[in-house]
Amino acid sequence: MTSTDDWEAWLADEFPGFLLPSSMHRAIAPEVAARFLARLGRPDHLRVLQGSAAFSPPESTAELRTFVHVLVPRLVEVLPSQTEVYARRWEEGFQGRLDVRTTLAERLAGNPSTFVTRARRRSYDLPETVLLKHVLSRVGRELARLRDAGLLPGASWSGPIDECEHRIGLLREGTVLRQVSDRPIEASDLVAARSAREPTYRTAERWYRRLRVAFDVPDEEATAALLARGALAPASADTRFEIAVTLRLLGALWTRVNEAEPGQWTLSQGLIHSGRRDLAVLRRHDGARVEVYYNQVVLPPGPRDCSAAYYFGSVGRLRPDWTVAVTVPGTPTRYVVGEIKHTADGGYERTGFSEAVLYRFEYGEALTGWLKSVLTVPGAVAGKARVGDPTIAVGWGDWVPSVVVDGVLENVIQPVDEVPTVNAAMASA
């Protein structure tokens, strides 16, 4: 642990929506979520984020599990119904109770072989039950979306609802709910559910409104408020520090290219979640590209990994905490990698530096610039970062130095002496 905790304050104010999925719930201010939304450039990730925010709060997971596994199964055993009387037309004979008046009208209309009877059938299409089935269907679809995104099952918050999607499928197709109509919801359905004595219907009405706010209301403020209540923060301080370092690096890179070549670059950001690719991509109009990865294996195995696999059957890989891929048209992609250690132990810091040095040799063919690897720690580092050092160590207080930014962006833009303030630049992104 370390007493240098200003990175926590920085992270709490920057990019809270990135923090998915192995995490615990933590509320954030609505204005912080709104700033994140303004910078989010990927609609598919926004949908995943909205779903996570809607389902992840502990009170929501508990209520949903009770709704799906207890309340609805209990209700469908005695699902309310009503008897409908309907007309049936017959030719050349009939079965059932003849409707004399309607049959006589057919005779007078010139249809002597037509008979009309009246039959009864049970209908479960009560307004509140139609709403109930609609809500179950929608919850099932959104849970499937989170599963496809790799957030279900397995996230620490998702345990209570991991089986809800399967249970919903059984309820919809294996009970009398399959006889309930699938039709658009009307205001009268909501009124019926809200005023019903049965608590299952009232719970369905609450979830209908919750999902409307989460996905349907075209109001950025409403969406930001939802994210503020449901944003996730990684449980581990180590992980939080890794994300803070990586995101601050991203901010510094964006600041530099935007200051050096205003209007020529665009920034596309994603979420940190299972199955993701790059965390963010900076693109220039001529095709130049700077891709930032967090905690992913990007480069092919080097000598250490190949030899370990041969001699020991090892399937593990050296994995930098961050990787930046720099592509300029007409030249091979160049990489810079980083190691992050959340520690105040000098010995562990030096171990981290040794790992950063090891990356230079493991991935040497891809690390073709003068800057190859970087170590970042929370506390101060005695020596200042120097141009020309293939491996650099930096403390959070000096992160991100101009030397690192210049090394990453070598041959992309002209180096400058100083990097403008990261927060201000990212706020304008």
Image (cartoon, rainbow, N blue to C red):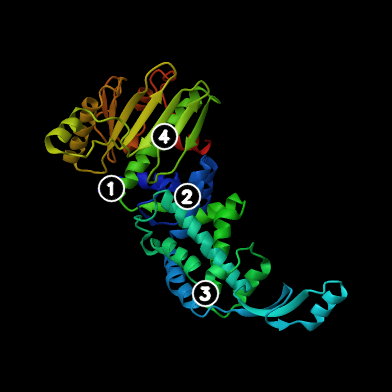
Q: Are marks 2 and 3 in contact (CB under 8 Å)?
A: no
Residue picked out by circle 2? 48
Q: CA distance from mark 3 to mark 1?
A: 49 Å
Of callouts 4 and 3, the N-terminal one: 3
Residue picked out by circle 3? 200
Residue 152 located left or right of residue 100:
left
Foreground pick, 108 / 360: 108
Of callouts 1 and 2, the N-terminal one: 1
**Could you tell me which residue is drawn at 52 percent across and 53 percent down?**
30
**Callout in the foreground (1, 4):** 4
Percent from the top left, x then y, of residue 70? Answer: 43, 74
Q: CA distance from mark 1 to mark 2?
A: 35 Å
**Could you tell me which residue is drawn at 39 percent across and 25 percent down?**
326
Q: Is residue 22 above or below residue 253?
A: below
Three-letter code, disc 1:
Ser
Residue 3's disc number: 1
